[in-house]
Structures are given as structure tokens and as C-alpha cells.
Image: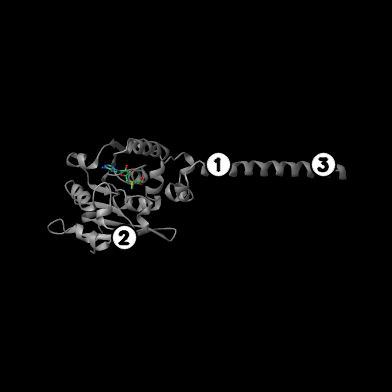
Amino acid sequence: MTANERVAVQASHSRRLKKRKRVKLKRSRGKRGDCAIISPLVKKYWLQRYHLFSRYDEGVELDEEGWYSVTPEEIAIRHAERCRGKTVIDCFAGVGGNAIQFAILCRHVIAIDIDPQKIALALHNAKVYGVEDRIDFVVGDFFQLAPSLKGDVVYLSPPWGGPSYKMIQQFNLDLLKPKDGYSVFQAAQRITPNIVMFLPRNMDLSQVEELSWLSSPPLHVEIEENYVDGNFKGITAYFSNVAWREA
Ligand SMILES: C[S@@+](CC[C@H](N)C(=O)[O-])C[C@H]1O[C@@H](n2cnc3c(N)ncnc32)[C@H](O)[C@@H]1O
């Protein structure tokens, strides 16, 4: 190869490199674009999107409430592991964060939400994970449906009242929505004593223990702290057979 030919090859190689760089820049502009169309409230949660759904890039969709209320995937997997092989009723299913993980590890899932848009998004997201056939999606009010529901485990992740729950020094069961935590728990207990409840990290734990005394004899209860990437995200209370017991 002559010196001139070598220069020509190097020049075309550097053009190819520039082209590749341009493509990369375009892609990263696309991601910033995604972020630009979401509200400032949601931006913080969008930055954590792969902790919420590891398959986010495959088409997962959330509405504004979904962004700040979905259970992070790592925690949802942990909840599902406790219910392995069981039929689980996810009474406040939202955009499907928990229901999808239950569908992967459990026998069957009934996913209920009062908001039809949430159920549409949960169905869409379940399709992204290929588990839509393992979930019955129901639009309805859990309190009205409860007397007719049957399952091995009831999963409760009721609304915590929006992101401002963090400002409260000690969260209590009266602050849960749409009804207080005692009413939610009592409705669940009529289905089964095997209950899993996901609650804020600043929850008054003595109140959670009090829930077990609503039964006679009191239910066995185990409380777990849930972290993602070292950040304290919430607590989970496991009651009755889903609680860990010493042998
Ligand atoms: C904290 S979010 C659930 C998030 C869900 N665990 C997830 O990972 O996507 C609470 C959900 O409860 C729903 N909800 C509120 N009141 C309800 C009711 N009475 N019956 C059923 N769902 C209700 C809301 O629409 C909201 O989607």
C-alpha cells in the first residue's frame, strides 16, 4: 500500500468513527427527549426506571400516579418469592409492578384496581413480560369485591397518599387511602389470614403489630425492611402463613 493509499484508508476509517459517534449522540438525545415529556414530579422516578421495571426499554408504560406508586421490581420479586406457588389477590394492582412478579412465581394472580387506566397499563406491562395469561385483570373497588374473592394470599399495597408521605415524621394507618389501614386489613382478613402488606418506611410499627391482634388468637407477624440500592423504600408486613417462623 502506498503512503497516499494509507492516508485514504485512515481518512475513511475516521469518517466511519465520526458517523458512529453521531449515531450514539442521536440515541442519547432520544433518551433525554423521553425525559422531557414527563412532568417534573415524575422526573425523579423516571431516573430510577430500571429499578421499577428492569424491562422498561421494551415498552413498559406508566401514568403519573403509577410512576410514584409502583413497587420497585426488586421488592416485588421478594414479595412474590414469599407467595411462590399460591393464588394471590393483588387488591390495589396499579400499573402491575407486583402482579407481574406474582405471575412469574405464583400459581395465579387476580389483579384488582378501581382505575380502568391502571388496569389497562397493568395488562400492557404484563404483555411486555409475557405473563398476561397468568393474571385475571379486574376493574373494581376492592371493598365491594372482597366478600366474593377467594385466594391463598391477599396482597395489599394501598395508596400512601402521594409522594408527600415522606414529609410525615411518623406515618400511621389512618393516613392510608382510600380507607384507613384497619379497614383495609379487616376486609382482607375475611378472605384469608395470609396477608402481605407493603407500607411506608416511616410507618409506626407498633400499629402494624396491632393489626395481628384483630384476630383471636393473634396472627403471627413478621416485619421486613425493604431497600433498593441501599435506599430504604418501605416495610413489608407478612401475616400468618406467609410470615417466617422459627422451626
Ligand atoms: C400504591 S398503588 C399500587 C401499586 C402497585 N402495587 C404496583 O406495583 O404497580 C395503589 C393503587 O390502588 C388503587 N386503588 C385506590 N382505591 C382502590 C380501591 N378502592 N379498590 C381497588 N384499587 C384501588 C389506585 O388506583 C392505585 O393504582
Where the N terminus falls, by quadrant?
Answer: top right
Query: Would residue 44 be found to the left or right of residue 30 on screen?
Result: left
Q: How far apart are marks 1 and 2 (CA)?
A: 38 Å
Q: Residue at x 36, y 42 (%)?
A: 96
How crowded pointer 2 is (Cα within 10 Å; few <14, some 14-19, many 20+) is rated as few
Q: Position of residue 8 (x, y in %)?
A: 82, 41
Residue matched to label 2: 224
**Image quadrant assignment for residue 225:** bottom left
Q: Disc 2 vs disc 3: Cβ atoms closer than 8 Å? A: no
Q: Which residue is drawn at 41% across and 43% down?
A: 64
Amino acid, disc 2: Glu
Q: Residue 8 carries which label?
A: 3
Q: Which of marks 1 and 2 is in front?
A: 1
- Judged from this view, the residue extending furthest toward the left is 216
Where the C terminus falls, by quadrant?
Answer: bottom left
Element type at marker 2? strand
Q: Position of residue 16 (x, y in %)?
A: 72, 41
| Sequence-wise first label, 2 or 3 | 3
Image: 170 above or below 104: below
Amino acid, disc 3: Ala
| Sequence-wise first label, 1 or 2 | 1
Q: Position of residue 217 (x, y in %)?
A: 13, 59
